[in-house]
Image (cartoon, coloured by chain):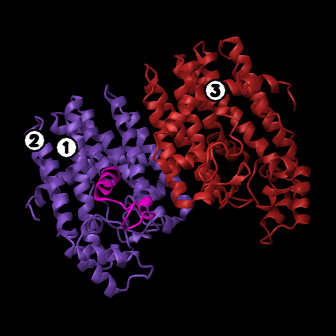
Chain colours: A purple, B red
Amino acid sequence: MPYGHGVAVGGVLKRSRELVRPALVEAVGRLHPWTGEMAAYALGWSDASGTPGRGGSEGKGVRQALAVLGAEAVGADGGVAVAGAVAVELVHTFSLMHDDIMDGDGLRRQRPAVWKAYGTGPAVLAGDAIHALAVQCLAEAPGPFTGDAVRRLCGTLNALVSGQAEDLRFERHPWSGTGAVGPDQYRSMAEDKTGALLGCAIALGATLGGAPSATVAVLERAGRQLGVAFQVVDDLLGIWGDPAVTGKPVHGDLRLRKKTYPVLAALAGTGAAARELAVLLDSPEPFDSATATRAAALVEEAGGRAATREEARRHLDAARHGLREVPLAPGAAADLDALFAYLLDRSW
Amino acid sequence: MPYGHGVAVGGVLKRSRELVRPALVEAVGRLHPWTGEMAAYALGWSDASGTPGRGGSEGKGVRQALAVLGAEAVGADGGVAVAGAVAVELVHTFSLMHDDIMDGDGLRRQRPAVWKAYGTGPAVLAGDAIHALAVQCLAEAPGPFTGDAVRRLCGTLNALVSGQAEDLRFERHPWSGTGAVGPDQYRSMAEDKTGALLGCAIALGATLGGAPSATVAVLERAGRQLGVAFQVVDDLLGIWGDPAVTGKPVHGDLRLRKKTYPVLAALAGTGAAARELAVLLDSPEPFDSATATRAAALVEEAGGRAATREEARRHLDAARHGLREVPLAPGAAADLDALFAYLLDRSW
């Protein structure tokens, strides 16, 4: 789904990172040296021995760019969004750190996850430190909109944790029958777990830029829709993605029997493929390659892959539509639109 | 060290719990049902199956009482402190939940710790949820002092995590020579780890009660001093406390070779007892009962026990003195003074 905006978006991401970086470095410098070292490792600034410049790849900084563009879109200078951008990047960092513990994921961006590199206890501690720091940086921002911004971030943190709780709880639900997870429930989980922080990023930028609350609400909603689209595309890649790109085995999420959107959408059908898929998933046997391949074929046959692509398109369209619902500065609005498209610009 | 204030303090604690309880229940009700269940368990409101009223003992609610008295001491109604009281109780709850994971402590108030009862991942998640909720409740409090209160809570969270980081790092320091942990370093750790939240509790009450910042600073300082006193008394009880009261084995902290104040103060001496103690602690052998008993005698002989008692008295005196440094409402000031004394009113 190429949009051809790659070059322009690259410039936007770079510009935002450069704008935000000094404040982010200063913020991390306020941590205890040990939690600061773990934060620098998680941010890709250093390796596990604390040596700077050997941290592998940094994140693209999508959330900070959304915050900066959120301010610019409502006619403010991107600089007013810096405290918000720092806050969302730190929240993202802390949540990955703790999610990796909960999910038992030992790898993050081709390096050991923080809990693998430093131990579970220290990773819990560093996540707590970064969580607290995120709110502190925003709460100390000058200007008349700080209180609103902090309340918005607090609501987002609550949603983020709820989404993760819901996702972890899905494991305990049956695949079919009473108590099965439906696509609606999945959508609501994804909106909290992935959408809330993307929406918050734009909303914080717009809030700190002095936008009226109706405008902020529309932009936040657009970010949340973007998050749902992003999450279901991730689910597609977790089954059909190229292992060389995703770093995960082929049909990986199926082997782990994760309750992802394509599978849930397939099971929501009533045909023979849906029924056979349910039997496979209900069996206590571990999935070998052949079974995983068969399950992937059944998900596709039952319409799960098509429904997921449709779901992604629908949410991306809704997100981009949101950008046209309120009057925005044209340049920043175009950048936001390109960034939205870029985020979904993977092979799915 | 009985002060005879037990009955009056019991009334203060009960009154504060009753004042704060509805808001605390409402706050916990905003959590995802699963993290809410873990929060209710941690607060002693329910057992691990989620059954209410079978949670064993609730905490005494010292921090909420400090917040309520902090408001009353500056002439405000205790009710204005409720959001602050909720916040400090939730921060306390979250920090115990995560500290028990980091320290590998499986028991908390004679019941399995949350991570033992629900698993490490869920306990990380529930702690995150309660941390976020604490800030959210305070940030949403009405009134002109909310911003100041939130910034104060954020600074406290940063200090709390730094103190825990410092305490965990002490393990890696040698017992003697270059890099040994000195009493000053310990004091600074204890002030962050234990004092910061007690100081914050009083300070939030005073802030929400509209006190000038100089008054708030004096009260916060008093709470921090109280925290150091409380922590070093805990250390005394960890070595010489009655196992029937502490729930820990005799000489427990020595067997675990914890870097507590009595030991560090003993090692700071230069006599024969200090030198023999250092040799014992440096040896790679695990401590049997006889060695632990010998080590305890050496700590005492080297002056560690007396120095710790002196340290506790000095900080408690400083805390109580703080209450006389600024003009306060006499009744609430007397209650605060009694509560300070009550917290140290154990056999040490």
Q: Is residue A34 visible?
A: no
Camera sees residue A288: yes
Residue at 63% over, 46% down: B46
For marks 2 and 1, give the CA distance: 15 Å
Q: Nearer the viewer, mark 2 or mark 1?
A: 2
Q: Residue at 74% across / 28% down in the picture? A: B340
Q: SS for tag 3? A: helix
Residue beneath label 2, please?
Answer: A324
Amino acid carrying mark 1 in the image: Leu
User: Which quadrant of the rendered structure holds the N terminus of chain A?
Assistant: bottom left
Q: Residue furthest bottom?
A: A290
Percent position of residue B66, x then y? 65, 27
Distance (Cα) linking label 3 and label 1: 47 Å
Give the residue number, with chain letter if any, for mark 3.
Answer: B18
Q: Is residue B293 above or below residue B325?
A: below
Contact check, label 3 and label 1, Cβ < 8 Å: no
Callout count: 3
Residue closer to the observer: B271 or B331: B331
Disc 3 residue crowd, few under 14, some 14–19, many 20+, Cα 10 Å = few
**Residue underneath mark 1:** A69
Residue A116 image point, x, y percent: 49, 69
Residue B50 x %, y %: 59, 50
On the image, which quarter does residue B169 sit in?
bottom right
Q: Quadrant of residue A200?
A: top left
- In the rendered structure, the answer to whether residue A132 lies left or right of residue A309 reads right
* Chain designation of label 2: A
| Callout in the foreground (3, 1) | 3
Query: Residue A185 colored magenta?
Result: yes
Residues rendered magenta in the picture = A168-193
Would you place residue A182 above or below residue A294 in this image?
above
Q: Quadrant of the C terminus of chain A?
A: bottom left
Residue A73 position (above or below residue A8): above
